[in-house]
Amino acid sequence: MKIERRHIVLASLVLALGAAVYLNWQFSDASSPDNLSVSKELGKASYVSSANVSTSDEKKTEKETKSKQDEYFAQAKSKRQETQDKVLDIAKEVLTLSNSSESAKENAVQQSAKISGYYAHQSNVENILLAKGFSQCLCFISDDGCSVIVKQSEMKDDSGLIIKDVVASQTGLSFDKISIVTI
């Protein structure tokens, strides 16, 4: 009798295992070719965010915005260079005019030296910010303070502090005289 009872228990376990395998196969629908490469894990969470989904229109708008930003930086740099060249030309004219007074010539030399210093600081700030990861930036220094223009998309939590630290270290200006403009 013992042997028969073991055989019955063993046969029922084999049947239960076979039924479990069949049900698993039936519910997972492993026979469809679309689901062959998909593996499912219990407890694995998947998050859905509509912020990461972009349509072709959004991609075009993004590219146009980047293009406009790049164009803005190029135009602003060329306008700034033209303005700086004009200022230096005016200072040279004052120095070369024979009828200019000595005080006017001395003032022109001081102003041109100060402006040249500003240009050097602007260039240094822009180069350091480029090295720190900003793809485009503009720096404008005047007697009143400094303005730095960067792309909004490149601003992170600590970017403002980084920019102000770079400007302060290069120009000696205090943080309250440094403004950051994003486009």
Image (spheres, grey):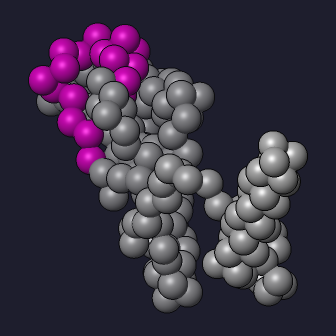
Report the front residue among 87 and 18: 18
Residue at image coords 77%, 66%: 15
The answer to whether residue 87 is visible is no
Residue at image coords 26%, 21%: 107
The answer to whether residue 12 is visible is yes
Residue 131 lies, with reference to residue 27, above or below; the image says above
In the rendered view, does 176 fall on the left or right side of 11?
A: left
Please provide percent x and percent y for residue 95.
40, 29
Please provide percent x and percent y for residue 131.
59, 28
Residue 151 lies, with reference to residue 112, above or below; the image says below
Residue at image coords 16%, 26%: 177
Q: Quadrant of the C terminus?
A: bottom left
Residue 172 lies in the magenta stretch: yes
Residue 176 lies, with reference to residue 27, above or below; the image says above
Please provide percent x and percent y for residue 46.
49, 59
Residue 122 lies in the magenta stretch: no
Could you tell me how many numbered marks the image carries? 0
Q: Quadrant of residue 135?
A: top right
Give the dominant element type of the magenta stretch: helix, strand or loop. helix
Report the front residue among 140 and 17: 17
Report the front residue among 82 and 161: 161
Please provide percent x and percent y for residue 138.
42, 44
In the rendered view, does 126 fall on the left or right side of 140?
A: right
Residues shaded magenta: 162-181
Q: Quadrant of residue 87?
A: top left
Residue 148 lies, with reference to residue 44, above or below; the image says above
Residue at image coords 55%, 53%: 42
Report the front residue among 57 and 99: 57
